[in-house]
Amino acid sequence: MNRSIVIKKATSSDVHFRLMDGAGSDAVHTSPTYAYAVCKLQTDHKIEGVGLAFTLGEGNNLVCQAIDYLVKHIEGREINELMANFGQVSKAMADDPNFRWLGPHKGVVHLALASVTNACFDLWAKANDIPLWKLLIDLPAESIANTLDLSYLEDVMTRKEAISILDKADPTKDEREGILKAGYRGYDTSIGWFNYSDEKIVSKISLAMDAGFTAMKLKVGSEDANRDIRRAHLVRKTAGDQATIMLDANQQWNLPKAIEVCRELKEINPFWIEEPTHPDDVNAHVTLAKEIEPIKLALGEHVPNRVIFKNYLQSGSMHFNQVDAVRVGGISEFIAISLMSKKFGIPVVPHVGDMGQIHQHLVLFNHIFLGHDAIFLEHIPHLKKYFKYPAQIIDGFYKTPQEPGMSADLVSHSK
């Protein structure tokens, strides 16, 4: 069903969720408040589009103010007509001449773009009365390309090449649709928050394994590296040799420190080490990747836009791409980055500032349409009760969502 739906008005809301008992903590963000800058699209029907951008609380109101400015580009538009050429609309918002100076393509303005963009994709799927993953995998390659702003990528990804990559994967989509029934494997981040005690980590690992998780992540980046090394060995011992263990430093180390500590952490055979140093320092990651081979690097949580992702992919230092659709300029830019990653042969394993709600749709698109390997998707359970249709994990696997839209609708919140 394809309904003609007009965006009558767009509004923002500043939504905060308090975390307790060390949940969400890492080496840099020691007392986070999870927050969403929410964009809602009110329409001439009884449905609304809901978009999210993720922050840690302070400054969330600034993102909302930016949303209120950007929505002038979409108000009054019919959703199917809007999405038929959304790439140009996205570019117009990102390059708004009165706003671009505050970025460009990063920070508050780009987070606002993410929320507005995600609301448009959500409404588009709802207008067609289908989940976002189905909308995306059923679209022709040219229609996908029409949603993308590929400016500044032309040296590695033209529109023609993007369509070619999509067309190449299209004939074999049916071979990968079995994942819709089997579910998409998850990994558990909530076992190893930075402020958790050793005893709590052991308890959380046991609970995660009982719930079917075979992959999990520990936060590192302590001032005393011996704490990280000890706790990493504790996780390996508790979870066993067959478990997949990731380590996340959340940008805490400088390059010499990263080299030193990563070499020590090699002993536990980590699947990756995530965000080892400053996210803008491509050259440092190149040096680090060479110094600590064969350990792999994962990054992208704080990489702000497709241009920096292009640089990382060109550098050869990114082994796992963690692009986040509530951090970059929304689903449109996420897809552009996924296309580049496919060209460079780098798997996409998103960071989930949305707690996995939106990304459970996007990884299905990545796997079924683009042919990306289905490795796993991060799962963070802390905001589950606040979503109308929370992500469902059974025996360690995301179950395929069936409700129309992208699963971003919230039911209640605290401020």
Image (cartoon, helix red, strand yellow):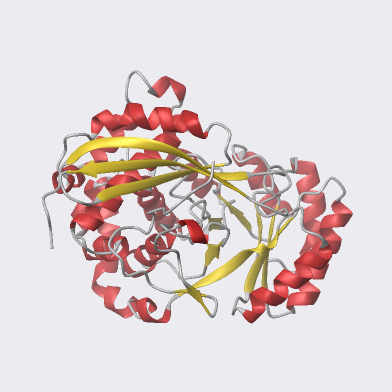
Relative to 3, is 109 on the left or the right? right
Q: Nearer the viewer, residue 385 or 144?
A: 385
| Placement of 68 over or under 311, stated as above or below | above
* Residue 39 position within the rendered picture, expressed as x and y whole percent measured from the top left: 36, 41
Q: Quadrant of residue 23?
A: bottom right
Which residue is rendered at x = 85% and y = 51% of the image? 225
Relative to 338, is 73 on the left or the right? left
Q: Quadrant of residue 215?
A: bottom right
Relative to 31, is 355 on the left or the right? left
Which residue is rendered at x = 22% and y = 65% of the image? 138
Is residue 87 visible in the rendered image? The answer is: yes
* Residue 258 position within the rendered picture, expressed as x and y whole percent measured from the top left: 76, 48
- Split into 4 quadrants, where in the image is the C terminus? top right
| Placement of 290 over or under 76, stated as above or below | below
| Placement of 161 over or under 375, stated as above or below | above
Is residue 152 visible in the rendered image? The answer is: no
Q: Quadrant of residue 220?
A: bottom right
| Placement of 221 over or under 214, stated as above or below | above
Which residue is rendered at x = 55% and y = 63% of the image? 378
* Residue 95 position within the rendered picture, expressed as x and y whole percent measured from the top left: 33, 27
How many marks the image carries: the answer is: 0
Which residue is rendered at x = 53% and y = 70% of the image? 186
* Residue 24 position within the rendered picture, expressed as x and y whole percent measured from the top left: 65, 52
Looking at this view, name the residue that lies furthest to the top.
Answer: 98
Q: Nearer the viewer, residue 177 or 194?
A: 194
Relative to 235, is 321 on the left or the right? left
- Split into 4 quadrants, where in the image is the N terminus? bottom left
